[in-house]
Amino acid sequence: MKRERPHVVVTRKLPEAVEARMRELFEVRLNTADRPMSHADLAQAAREADVLVPTLTDRIDQTLLAAAGPRLRLIANYGAGVDHIDVATARTRGILVSNTPGVLTEDTADMTMALILAVPRRMAEGLALMQEGRWEGWSPTAITGHRIWGKRLGIVGMGRIGQAVARRARAFGLQVHYHNRRRLHAETEAGLDATYWESLDQMLARMDIVSVHCPHTPATYHLLSARRLQLMKPSAYIVNTARGEIIDENALIRMLKRGQLGGAALDVFEKEPAVNPDLVGLPNVVLLPHMGSATEEGRLEMGEKVILNIKTFADGHRPPDQVLPSML
């Protein structure tokens, strides 16, 4: 007897090749308009679908899961982060959650290194000077920044992306330091030539550049609080390509305006998609629209992982990228 194809609802537009493959394999409802679904639309999809494919902009909370239909058995997230999904509630309701780990590591690490370079070297200011036609020629004292060679880089969160950043940083002559929930194995740590700090406070006080790479969880909300930000050197820079909620954004803005930090480079924001207007226009800040993982190759690989998770589940097996509450 032929197995019935699962009914899959996708909340945002995905790459065409991914959508085409989904149409071949599943009964799928796509979001061709690419407008974010309202909470009511998401609830309706959860009542109808066997598999829901959300993205980081979709809030899959306890209320929505309580209203889900009996058919919903898998939430196959298009993305690695699952802080927008109530994984614990999903599990109690017998709904599996999967994600797409690993495929965005190198892309995000590349963007992080670009930002680590951009702020000390004042690239955004130089670009604005050129685009606005204000450049009057070379001068020995114009747009002078700071070298990163020999500086101390403190990585907050030494998972896949943190380690990929560490590998790149060594090539740029940075001294790599890190704070992590668990210390790396000695062999891995030696391979990265990285120094472990058990105390985040002590590490922050000694770094020239701090780069954030931990997930957003209740434990990491405002991990870089006003108190911790004030521990940093006035000349230090902070880079965030992880989640905006990890930094107390209002405290960061106050310090940047007062000259208590050298600068910041942010690809994520605390109230996304809203960006605090006090951040916009600060000369020592580089802002990007959450594009750290935005490569065509990465987006395709994410789709392939989603499809594999759904196909494996539909065949009666555990999805290879299942997320458990204990993993968070």
Image (tube, grey):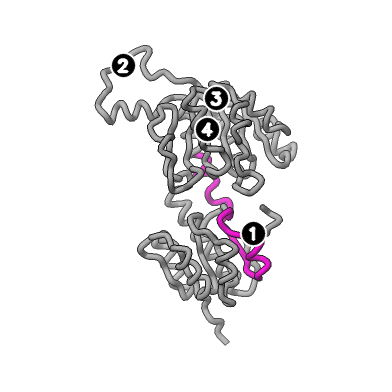
Residue tagged 2: 138
- Type of residue at label 4? Leu
Q: Answer whether residue 86 is magenta in the image.
A: yes
- Type of residue at label 3? Ala
CB under 8 Å between callouts 4 and 1? no
Question: Whole-Å distance between the Cαs marked 2 and 3?
Answer: 27 Å
Q: Nearer the viewer, residue 135 or 64?
A: 64
In the image, farthest residue toward the right: 186
Vertical comparison of 126 with 187: above or below: above
Kindly identify which numbered label has been placed on residue 252: 4
Precedes in sequence: disc 4 or disc 1: 4
In the image, farthest residue toward the bottom: 1
Question: Whole-Å distance between the Cαs marked 2 and 1?
Answer: 54 Å
CB under 8 Å between callouts 2 and 1? no
Q: Which residues are magenta?
A: 82-110
Residue tagged 3: 236
Question: Whole-Å distance between the Cαs marked 4 and 1?
Answer: 32 Å
Question: Whole-Å distance between the Cαs marked 4 and 2?
Answer: 33 Å
Whole-percent x, y for residue 98 in the image: 60, 61
In the image, farthest residue toward the top: 140
Precedes in sequence: disc 3 or disc 4: 3
Precedes in sequence: disc 4 or disc 2: 2
| Between marks 2 and 3 in the image, the one whose residue lies nearer the viewer | 3
The answer to whether one can see residue 163 in this image is no
Whole-percent x, y for residue 301 in the image: 50, 56
Residue positioned 38% across, 60% down in the render: 34
Whole-percent x, y for residue 16 in the image: 39, 62
Residue tagged 1: 323
